[in-house]
Image (spheres, rainbow, N blue to C red):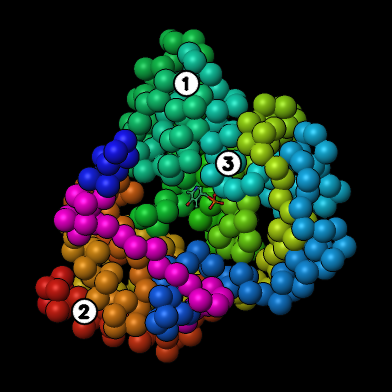
Amino acid sequence: MSLQYLSDELKTLREQGLYQKLRVLDGEQLPVATFDGKKVINLSSNNYLGLNTHPRLREAALEATRRLGVGSGAVRTIAGTMRIHMELEEKIARFKNTEACVVFQSGFAANAGTVAAILKKGDIIISDELNHASIIDGCRLSRADIRVFPHKDVAAAEKLLQEAQSQPGHKLLISDGVFSMEGDIAPLPRLCDVAERYGAIMMVDDAHASGVLGRNGRGTIDHHGVHGRVHIQVGTLSKAIGSLGGYVCGSRDLIDFLYHRARPFLFSTSHPPSVTATCMAAFDVLEEEPERIARLWENTRFIKKGLQGLGFNTGMSETPITPVIVGAAKLAHALSRRLFEEGVFAQGIGFPTVPEGKARVRTIVTATHTPQELQQALDVFARVGRELGIIQ
Ligand SMILES: *Cc1c(COP(=O)(O)O)cnc(C)c1O
């Protein structure tokens, strides 16, 4: 049978304890939610601010559906640009204080579509080794030369830019704003320094910083005060914003160029009105309910302190993403499985999502977890961590 080799590979994954069954959520994405029929404390979603179920967002989706229907009917460049799509882009551009914005179907499409559109063979990309898969795919699609620097190593990035200086072609320096597996923040001021020194384009993917870092969740550019120094800011609408989508903010010409050349924009249908209306409402909530972000950070401090106090290795996290690094993928998956049995859902993550030997369980708190829920989760971590010999 022609697909037998796939079955063989799956068998190997099972033997290695790396096979993962999809956990199925019944009901809403809440801080305590029902996965696979079991009620658990949910430390696995990216629903940072609880906006997935915010009444105002839900109402916006329903109202837009009633008024405008359930689908856009075409790609943006043919007949699929609705008034509401333009309004959302204008709203995000104002929020980020940039000239313009383009919304994509997902953050993945935003990254991959943008990098592939603005660079070509002969150009050079300088990329952090822990950048997101969508950046890596965009780099590959562009056919530019990809040069990877060790995580957050600005001196190494500078060296690569220096080496590329005599070569023709455009240079792009690209980094996640917040790294999705480590939860640490990119050293943007120093990255901007070297990008400027060598005339490189500076691009930041703020998927995990949108709605989390900076004033009212404006992201790492705002957090670090590097306004005007990052040419291309990517954000997601799928995480803290609560719905689905990705966006690119920058100059009017950058956005106009992407309207003409970004392939997900040209060849894939735009969002239904409900998604777009939901995102519009989410940006209003970011401005009007800053207490959500404050609670997110209170909860972040609480769980980090708790996990570290128990003796877990939480790496270099500085954000609501707190990894519990255990080493072997098998151990990470065992930890995740036992936590789940004891009522805590934190996903195990191994190679190739993280480097080999750095497998982990990743926790993400949200603004809507109560201190009691988080303490209960810590108690389970303590018990299971000792049982598996991860902590004393
Ligand atoms: C999740 C994520 C994306 C993709 O965003 P989606 O909107 O889910 O497609 C891109 N970059 C990073 C760093 C992410 O964590």
Residue labelled 3 has its Cβ within 8 Å of some atom of ligand 1 = yes
Q: Name the quarter where the N terminus is drawn.
A: top left
Q: Is residue 262 magenta?
A: no
Q: Amino acid at mark 1?
A: Arg
Q: Is residue 173 left or right of residue 159?
A: right
Judging depth in this view, the residue of 25 and 57 nearest the camera is: 25
Q: Residue furthest bottom?
A: 372
Label 2 and label 1: CA atoms lie apart by 46 Å
Residue at the spot 60% in from the left edge and 48% down from the top edge: 106
Q: Secondary structure at mark 3?
A: helix
Q: Which portion, as a residue range, is magenta? A: 10-32
Q: For mark 2, what is the residue? A: 384
Residue 322 seen anywhere in this rendered image of the structure: no
Judging depth in this view, the residue of 217 and 346 nearest the camera is: 346
Q: Residues within 10 Å of mark 3 (few under 14, many from 20)?
A: many
Q: For mark 1, what is the residue? A: 143
Q: Secondary structure at mark 2?
A: helix
Q: Earlier in the sequence, mark 2 or mark 1?
A: 1
Q: Earlier in the sequence, mark 3 or mark 1?
A: 3
Which mark is on residue 31?
none
Q: For mark 3, what is the residue? A: 109
Judging depth in this view, the residue of 322 and 68 nearest the camera is: 68
In the image, residue 67 sits, relative to residue 165, either above or below, namely: below
Contact (CB < 8 A) between labels 3 and 1?
no
Residue at the spot 44% in from the left edge and 15% down from the top edge: 165
Q: Earlier in the sequence, mark 2 or mark 3?
A: 3
Label 2 and label 3: CA atoms lie apart by 38 Å
